[in-house]
Image (cartoon, rainbow, N blue to C red):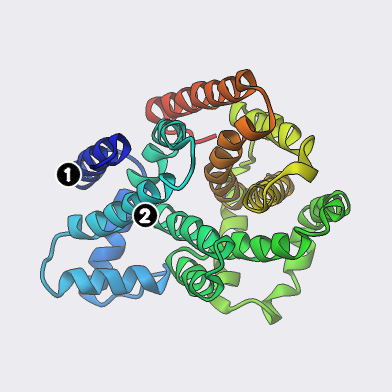
Amino acid sequence: MISYYRCYSLLFLIIFTIFGVFKPINLLPDMGTYQDYFNNVKTGVNVLVEYSFILVSKLVLSFSDSFRWVIFLYVFISLYVKFNCFIMFKKKNAIFLMYISSLLILHEFIQIRIALAISLLFLSSILYVKGYSWRAFFLFLFSILIHTSSIVFVFIFYVSIILEARRRFVFILIPFVFVFSNFFLDILSFSNFILPDYIYDKLILYINVSQHMNQSMNIFSVRMMVLYILMVLILYKLIYLSKLDFVYFFCVSLLVILSIGFKSIPDIAFRLVDIAIFFSIFLIQSTYKYYQKSVFYFSVSLFIISSIYYNYRLLAYTNLY
């Protein structure tokens, strides 16, 4: 017998995919840019984007000239992976509700590359903890090919695996990461000898745009405050966390700390926060194991309310943070 969750998740998978594919291209940001990338691939013009997007575009062009097929592949696979992984958690209904109220619009309807990359990061993390380390490794590599920013999560993930048996080192490492991120611009001047040209050039582009437009991320925004509260709640139960909960806590904490250090480079900071927000959903659902039910319901409600507020501002002002 098909479970209630599988029925409604399949229904929403179809609905969200159809809307993602057939919505007006210029209704939300980024899609117009992706369509330009697709058209440039069609005409043979060089594109500054992950090669995986170029390969997907060429695959679509082998049977259609429609950019909407590219959207379909990214959105459908992204949601299919997420919805099927949610079922592995006891509070899958709460996870589903938190996701569709928070990141669905931003990712599956706008930032389709990072949406798919996060889905693969999520699946990889679960596979690793379940003992399928090599499958996880190759999926991690694939996620980096989908979106370069995934490399940050992958690196932090493997560090968390090393520290899982030495949890008290977290208190030493977090301040170190904060200091590192604040001196990132100075370190970057030497990084062109280490980083691939594509990544280095993209970082420089982000920095120049941010400095030109005088942009900065608000580290006291509603969503950041929710992350701070969650980090304190989970940190208090650090020694009791399961392996997967500890890994997600460590990853979310370091991503948040890095985003604070990179606040003057919002294109990088926002991406780190996006990944942290996704994995924070699973920390919130885990609070039922370490606290009374009231804490779980409070955390879920706070996350959903703050996410609805965020999405309202996104749709009303197209101002992400």
Tag 1's secondary structure?
helix
Q: Residue at x 25, y 59 (%)?
A: 73
Q: Is residue 248 visible?
A: yes
The outermost residue toward the front is: 1
Front: mark 1 or 2: 2
Q: For residue 34, which numbered disc appears in the image?
A: none
Residue at the image point whose x is 87% and y is 51% from the top: 168
Q: Position of residue 9 (x, y in %)?
A: 29, 40
Where residue 22 is drawn, which disc sits there? 1
Task: Tell me if mark 2 has few (under 14), some (14-19) or many (20+) residues whose alpha carbon lies within 10 angstroms of its own.
Answer: some
Nearer to me, 219 or 103: 103
What is the distance, in whole Å, between disc 1 and disc 2 at their CAs?
21 Å
Q: Position of residue 68 (x, y in %)?
A: 19, 55
Would residue 264 be seen by someone viewing this image from the given angle?
no
Residue drawn at the location 46% of the way across and 58% of the way down: 123
Mark 1 crowdedness (10 Å alpha carbons): few <14, some 14-19, many ≥20:
few
**In the image, is residue 293 above or below residue 110?**
above
In the rendered image, the vertical position of residue 71 relative to residue 298, given as above or below: below
Q: Is residue 79 left or right of residue 126?
A: left
Residue 293 is situated, as x and y percent measured from the top left of the image, at 60, 21
The C terminus lies in which quarter of the figure?
top right
Which residue is the site of mark 2?
A: 81
Q: Residue type at mark 2?
A: Val
* Picture residue at 71% right of the left edge, 33% below the top: 228
Q: What percent of the width, then of the height, locates residue 128?
A: 56, 65
Mark 1 or mark 2, which has the lower sequence index? 1
Most extreme residue toward the bottom is: 193
